[in-house]
Amino acid sequence: MILTDDDRRLRDGDEGPAVAAAMDLLVRYGEALDAERLCDVRNVAGTTTQPSPVKARLVAEGGWDRAFSLINLDADETLPIPPMAVPTCQLQHGFGRDAVGVAPYPPEMIALQDDGEAFVGARGVSVLATCTPYQVGNLPVRGEHCAWMESSAVVYANSVLGARTNCEGGASTGAASLTGRIPCWGNHRDDERLGTHHVRVETPVASFLDWGLLGYAVGDAVQEGRPVVTGDLALPDLTDLKHFGAAAASSGGVEMYHVPGVTPEATSTEAAFGGRPPRDTVVFGAAERRAAYERLNDQGTCEDVDFVLLGCPHASLDQLRDAARALEGRRLADGTELWIMAPRALVAVAERSGYTAVIEAAGGRVLTDSCPAMSRTAPAGTRVFATDSAKQAHYLPAILGIEAWFGTTAECVDAAVTGRWRGELR
Ligand code: F3S
């Protein structure tokens, strides 16, 4: 791999041992990928603070320097961790203090996470604590090289923002945060951003549910491909695109998609493909829409719902407002809980706007920082849950061994206030 003089300087220890370990990691990673060089990044979204029993042991042994060295730099020895070299944010992690008494989540993990936040905060990490950093101020410009984790955030950054990132991990983002470098391969390269599959939509896609079903079907069909979606599409809003990308990154490994006339690198269908013919064509009609819906609901048998989850990926302000409107003057059924996951920074606005008060008056809770899948936690005794998120319906049954229902936000709110699932595809 070609290294610049500055790359070599960092690798040789001019900026200290932690930066040298970070460069060593990035060079090994880049060589394994056959990357020709590293590219400069000035926007890293990773995770250091997510608590776990292993991390608790490492912190007890040698503090957060020890945990960061081993987990985020793949270094055997404990290195003093300096301030981050480039703007870096902490993504979602475990539940925080707002979940005490609500989520059955160990208090010692919350205390460990608080400690980790102090450590990284002192080194210049912005603790956004959300899977949607783009909703709370981390907005890279078009063409900007980034190093982001979290599949739903990566597909949003590439497709909706036109930024450039692969789906990184805890070690590569840790190394990127200390060096401002990442191997230049995959989504960083012009030719690997062009469309591979043409998706022809032949049934109307207009609602939040529709965009989730479309994403789930498309991810399954194209896997790691880059779909170009055309046809019977109403103009999506950012929440629809958030749902579409998260769903496509769950049933498949989509990291980049184009909607000609909507997403920034697809001024036309031809531009999205860069003049190349599509590798394959996928049709999304009424039959494919129903198949996606049935697949997302194939884990549901019991219609008694214990738990309703909204906000995966973390809710937008519009979603919080809509949930409050749907719950106004209503009350959750006995034995049913409702959690809405959202970025803490947006919850401050939701509180100020009165949305949170309405949701809590109905018996629901707005929680931050994490989600049931990330923290492997649901209300005690949950057997059946309902969600409007294709991603959460895809993952949570396997993670927690519970049944899932997937439907519209209104159907989920209905399940929360009646304790019964009455959803159906319309
Ligand atoms: Fe976010 Fe959890 Fe969904 S981290 S994308 S709410 S699975």
Image (tube, grey):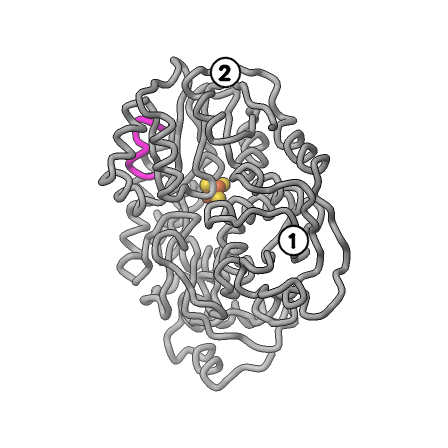
What number is the disc on residue 146? none
Magenta span: 96-102
Tag 1 secondary structure: strand
Left or right: where 345 falls relative to 312: left
Residue 57 is at least partly visible in this image: no
Tag 2 secondary structure: loop
Q: Nearer the viewer, mark 2 or mark 1?
A: 1
The residue that mark 1 highlights is 230
Q: Residue at x 46, y 46 (%)?
A: 239
Query: Could you tell me which quadrant the C terminus lies in?
Result: top right
Amino acid type assigned to the residue bearing label 1 in the image = Thr
Amino acid type assigned to the residue bearing label 2 in the image = Arg
The residue that mark 2 highlights is 420
Up the image or down, 313 lies above or below 259; here it is above
Q: What is the spatial separation of the Cα atoms under label 2 and label 1, in whole angstroms?
A: 37 Å
Of all residues, the one furthest to the left in this rendering is: 352
